[in-house]
Image (cartoon, rainbow, N blue to C red):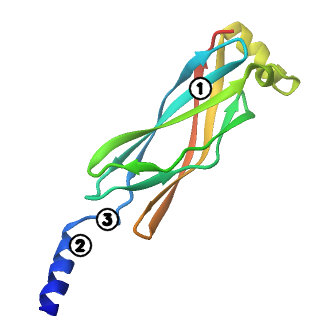
Amino acid sequence: MKKLIILSTYLLFSACTITEKPEFKGIENIDVLESTSKHFIIRADAVFLNPNDVGGKLKTDEIKVFINNNEMALVSTEAFNVPSKKEFKIPLKTSISKDSLFSNKNLSGLINSLFSKKVAVRYTGTIDYTILGFSHSYNIDKTEEIKIKY
């Protein structure tokens, strides 16, 4: 009986893929979600494909957001449940004060942005994947120019 339980357990776990890391496909859809007189809300989607038969968790604590090469915000997410055998997106959303955007440290890039109505937004940091003691970190570094409304 003991051998049957061990054999069943082995067959169950050998048939399930659990140690492959989800494939990071990139950052997409960087844009301004909302613009008020006090702040911008910028969002992006981190896109993954999970080939595993089971899920896991993805989490980030410190993805930095740069506007025109100046650090403006940090994005932190709660643990995100990863679906099995599926492509999925993790929303990365942050609020940036217009006061910080128009500060002296950002003045050189701001002058160009005023004329073009575009800013360079860069997301950089790591996203961590964990499942049953297995973990992997994904390095994120994506820059895109987006249109803004003042």
Contact (CB < 8 A) between labels 2 and 3?
yes
Q: Position of residue 106 (x, y in %)?
A: 81, 25
* Amino acid residing under circle 3: Ile
Residue 73's quadrant in the figure?
Answer: top right
| Residue at the extreme bottom | 2
Q: Position of residue 147 (x, y in %)?
A: 59, 15
Residue 75's quadrant in the figure?
Answer: top right
Return the disc, 3 or 1, that comes first in the chain's sequence. Answer: 3
Q: Secondary structure at mark 1?
A: strand
Q: CA distance from mark 2 to mark 1?
A: 41 Å
Question: In the drawing, does residue 137 fall left or right of residue 41?
Answer: left
* Residue found at x 16% / y 85%: 5
Q: Residues within 10 Å of mark 1 (few under 14, many from 20)?
A: some
Q: CA distance from mark 2 to mark 3?
A: 8 Å
User: Which disc number belongs to residue 33?
Assistant: none
Contact (CB < 8 A) between labels 2 and 1?
no
| Residue at the extreme front | 1
Q: Residues within 10 Å of mark 3 (few under 14, many from 20)?
A: many
Q: Secondary structure at mark 3?
A: loop
Which quarter of the image is occupied by the C terminus?
A: top right
* Residue found at x 69% / y 20%: 39
User: Which disc number belongs to residue 13?
Assistant: 2
* Amino acid residing under circle 1: Ile
* Residue found at x 34% / y 47%: 49
- The residue that label 1 is drawn on is 42
- The residue that label 3 is drawn on is 18
Which quarter of the image is occupied by the N terminus?
A: bottom left
* Residue found at x 18% / y 69%: 15
Question: In the drawing, does residue 148 fall left or right of residue 1?
Answer: right
Return the disc, 2 or 3, that comes first in the chain's sequence. Answer: 2
